[in-house]
Structure formats: C-alpha cells, structure tokens
C-alpha cells in the first residue's frame, strides 16, 4: 500500500509540474547598432523558420549589404554591411505541443526587437534623383515625395529631389535573448540574436525601455495554454 501511494504521489507531482505555467523573458543590450534598411522580419523570423532542422535548433551567421543613407540616389550601391548571428535551441516540454517552445521564443523575441528598433529608427526617402518638371506624370504620381504643391517634400540636401520609395533606417540592439522559465527556474530552451555592422555602435542607455514595456503590456498571444502572455522585458545582459 505504501508503495502504491508513493507511485500515485509521484504521478500527481509530475502532472502538476507539467501544467505549471511558463514565462518568456527577453533581455536586450542598450548598445544600438546601425542596421540600415534591414528587414527584421526577413532576417529573424523567416531565417529561423526557413532553416533546416529548425524544429530543434538553429545556428545562423549571415551578412547583409544595406543602404544606410537618407536620400540615396537611384541605383545607389549599399554602403553598410551588417551581420546577424542567430543561436537557438528548443525541445519538447511537458504540457506543450511539439513546436510551442520554438514559437513562443521566436514570436516574443521578434515582437520586442521590433518595438525596440522602431523607437530608435527613422523614416527616410531613397531611390532619389534631381527633380525636373519633364519627369513623366506617371512617375510623379508614384513618387514617395517631390517638391510640388500638395505633395510631401523629400527634404533632401542640395537641389530639389524626387524620390521613388520610402523606408526605414534601423538601429537594433547589439544582442537580444529570449529565455523560458517555469516556476522561476531557467529552462534550456532559448533564442539569441546578435547584430553588428561597421558603423559605430552607440549606448542608448535603455532610454526607451518604459515605452517598450508599455507597448506589450497587453501581452503577446502564445501557443499553448500554459505559456503566460505576460512577458518579462529587461534592458541589460
């Protein structure tokens, strides 16, 4: 009877642990890196889910040639090389589906990364050329900016310009990491993304942390019912 009771107790404890809530915590560096016109969704989300073996882990190290200049000319060559290193591992966790850990880490890190970067980045016009009234009317209609009444000015230095596109010159944290915790205990499942470029990095001293926390205060939808939608965000590594 004592032996049976011990087995039942062990099963009960295991079941309770399996259903205890998990929480994702994201930490990022206050050092911000120039990342030009980098597409964050492409270099993080798409890169991870497009990698072989991403059901268990990923190791990535890629370089991207980017524009990092306002009012760059039509056909301008990239003037910034940025490097993105990704390291992540995840597995089956009791109480979760087979890919829930990966999904929670990726979507949380990607959301926090976007919120941090958006507050350190600036909109720019590019694919520009000198403005001339002889420019075809169709090109004028499609332009992102041009010096005409009722249209947004490009505000480019020098002679008046017409620019074909609008984008974002980004800054990103030098490192951002997402970890999983269960009852305050750190689990081995994690995802780290590191950014670097040849442009000088700058310590932003976590100046937008409060805004970032406020932006995700409502929580982030999670796969699986036992992962908390409330995210821990810390600016420091």
Image (cartoon, grey):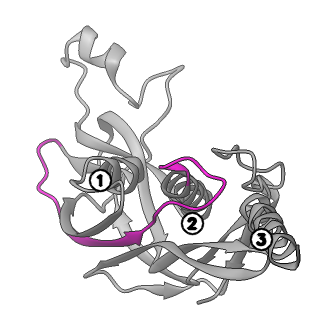
Can residue 158 be seen in the rendering of this structure?
A: no
Q: Is residue 4 left or right of residue 141?
A: right
- Asked if labels 1 and 2 touch by Cβ distance under 8 angstroms, the answer is no
Numbered badge on residue 120: 2
Q: Could you say which is closer to the camera, residue 199 or residue 20? A: 20
Q: Secondary structure at mark 1?
A: helix
The quarter of the picture where residue 185 lies is bottom right
- Gap between marks 1 and 3 measured at Cα: 45 Å
**Up-down relation of residue 162 to residue 174 (above or below):** above
Numbered badge on residue 161: none
Q: Position of residue 140 (x, y in %)?
A: 31, 18
Q: In the rendered image, which residue does mark 1 sit on?
A: 47
Q: Position of residue 149 (x, y in %)?
A: 50, 21
Q: Could you say which is closer to the camera, residue 128 or residue 213? A: 213
- Asked if labels 3 and 1 touch by Cβ distance under 8 angstroms, the answer is no
- The verdict on residue 222 being magenta is no
Q: In the rendered image, which residue does mark 3 sit on?
A: 7
Q: Position of residue 142 (x, y in %)?
A: 33, 18
Give the extent of the magenta segment: 74-100
First in sequence: mark 2 vs mark 1: 1
Q: Secondary structure at mark 2?
A: loop
- Gap between marks 3 and 2 measured at Cα: 56 Å
Give the residue furthest to the front: 1
**Up-down relation of residue 157 to residue 174 (above or below):** above
């Amino acid at each position: 009877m004592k032996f049976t009771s011990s087995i039942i107790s062990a099963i009960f404890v295991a079941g309770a642990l399996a259903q205890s809530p998990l929480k994702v915590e994201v930490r990022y560096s206050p050092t911000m890196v120039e990342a030009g016109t980098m597409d964050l969704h492409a270099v993080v989300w798409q890169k991870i889910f497009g990698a072989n073996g991403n059901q268990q882990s990923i190791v990535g190290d890629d370089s991207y040639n980017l524009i990092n200049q306002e009012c760059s000319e039509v056909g301008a060559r990239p003037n910034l090389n940025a490097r993105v290193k990704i390291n992540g591992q995840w597995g089956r966790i009791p109480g979760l589906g087979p890919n829930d850990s990966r999904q929670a880490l990726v979507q949380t890190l990607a959301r926090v990364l976007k919120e941090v970067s958006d507050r350190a980045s600036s909109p720019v016009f590019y694919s520009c050329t000198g403005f001339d009234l002889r420019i075809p009317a169709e090109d004028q209609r499609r332009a992102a900016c041009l010096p005409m009444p009722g249209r947004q000015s490009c505000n480019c230095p020098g002679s008046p310009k017409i620019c074909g596109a609008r984008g974002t010159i980004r800054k990103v944290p030098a490192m951002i990491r997402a970890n999983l915790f269960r009852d305050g205990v750190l689990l081995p499942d994690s995802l780290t993304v590191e950014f670097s470029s040849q442009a000088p990095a700058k310590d932003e001293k976590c100046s937008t942390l409060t805004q970032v926390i406020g932006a995700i205060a409502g929580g982030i939808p999670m796969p699986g019912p036992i992962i908390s939608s409330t995210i821990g965000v810390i600016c420091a590594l």
